[in-house]
Image (cartoon, rainbow, N blue to C red):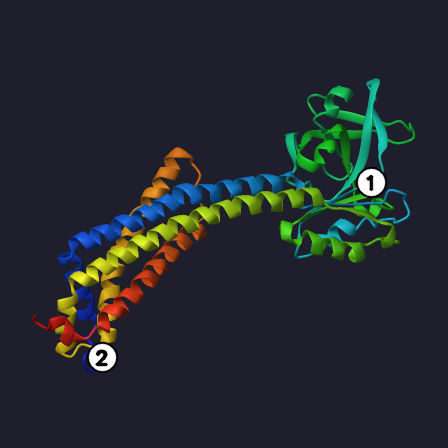
Amino acid sequence: MVTETVWRGSPRTRDLLRDAGQGARAQIATTFTLVLVLATVCFSILVTTGQSAASEARIVEQIDSAGTRLIALSDDGGNARILPDAPATLAILSDVSWTFGLGEAVDVTNPLLRDGRVASRALVGPLPADVALIQGRIPQVGEAIIGSTATATLHLAEGLGTVQVLDATRDPVGVVGVFDATGPLEHLSNTVLVATAPADMESLRYVYVMATDVTTVNRLEEVLATSTPADNPAALTIETPSGAIALRDVIAGRLGATSRQLMAVVMGVGAVIIAVTMLSATVSRRRDFGRRRALGATRSALVAALLAQTLIGAVTGIVLGTSAGLIVLHYTTASLPSWQFTAGVAGLTLLLTLLAATPIATHAAHRDPLLILRVP
């Protein structure tokens, strides 16, 4: 049978919690004030800083989707000779989300209506998310898909038909779908992409690599400079969205700094009110503390009792304020901060409450009981 060891003058945990509950009910005005203050603090932070944090996350996400993670490798002069299996080799890197390669541009036309021509490139690798198929199906090797802008030029609005290289010795290629490219790949919408097996090509002119996270772009750039399969990697041109990354960091930094300053002000005011409330509560109970000390209660037991009583009001206020803040954000902005931010605000508020209450509780527990109980 397990027994609980209790030092002399120290109450059991169950008795301590029961005493804290009785104290909270006995000092209902103090408890209510504490609940109101902490609920207001959490609510204010969530509807201001929380909304800013959610807006920052949306803005950063939009910037990221615009191409802050895309790295383009090009063989402009044809001297690097990127090997056709480069996309498959780079796709296995841990920092790579997806990759594909493009061959040299070749003009094609509609063999039935030869009044227009667009560029065609061999496609090695799967279509990425930024190249969405909007009509038809994914091409098999030897088949083509046409960009949404090029359909009008070649009169292939339905995305079905054939394209013919201007060199008449080559066979026509069947078109089986239409794609729409967005973001940094938007220029591909005016081309025809022909699915090609790596074994059927000699080299690639472009390889596009999407990093898994914007923070890995610089590291991935260094890896690609030396690890890209090519006859002459030193001749490769590597383009990274350094301007977009810098803009992202500036926007995130400014929004984050403003949010942190506002949160610090709200929590600072809340800490002052909490300290004043706890000081008033301990002053009103000084004779009760004196009697307990005279009867043998330890200083640590008194401090624990006061902090436990504070926790009852603090947890209640934090739960109410957090819930109210999330409800208001849901119905007014339809955008909620992350659960990490919400949990961090609740935890920081609780910690701030304990830090504000601990010195006051310690001071009350160390007062001389003879002076407190002395009758004038």
Identity of the residue drawn at 32% across and 54% down: 272
Q: Where is residue 64 in the image (x, y as percent from the top left)?
A: 62, 43
Q: Which amino acid is tagged 1?
A: Gly
At mark 2, the secondary structure is loop
* Residue closest to the far left: 375
Q: Position of residue 42 (x, y in %)?
A: 35, 48
Gap in angstroms between the C-alphas marked 2 and 1 = 76 Å
Q: Which mark is residue 146?
A: none
Quadrant into which the C terminus falls: bottom left
Identity of the residue drawn at 71% across and 36% down: 185
Of residues 61 and 42, the one drawn nearer to the viewer in this rendering: 42
Q: Position of residue 55 (x, y in %)?
A: 50, 40
Q: Is residue 76 left or right of residue 189?
A: right
Quadrant into which the N terminus falls: bottom left
Find disc 2 in the rendering and name its residue.
4
Identity of the residue drawn at 74% across and 53% down: 221
Q: In which quarter of the image is residue 343?
A: bottom left
**In this view, 217 is above or below 51:** below
Q: Which amino acid is tagged 2?
A: Glu
Find disc 1 in the rendering and name its residue.
103
Of residues 288 and 370, the one drawn nearer to the viewer in this rendering: 370
Ranked by sequence position, the earlier of labels 2 and 1 is: 2
Q: Where is residue 298 in the image (x, y as percent from the top left)?
A: 21, 77
Of residues 241 and 230, the one drawn nearer to the viewer in this rendering: 241
Residue 126 appears in the picture as rendered: no
Say which of marks 2 and 1 sits in front. Answer: 2
* Residue closest to the far front: 376
Q: How many numbered marks does the figure carry?
A: 2
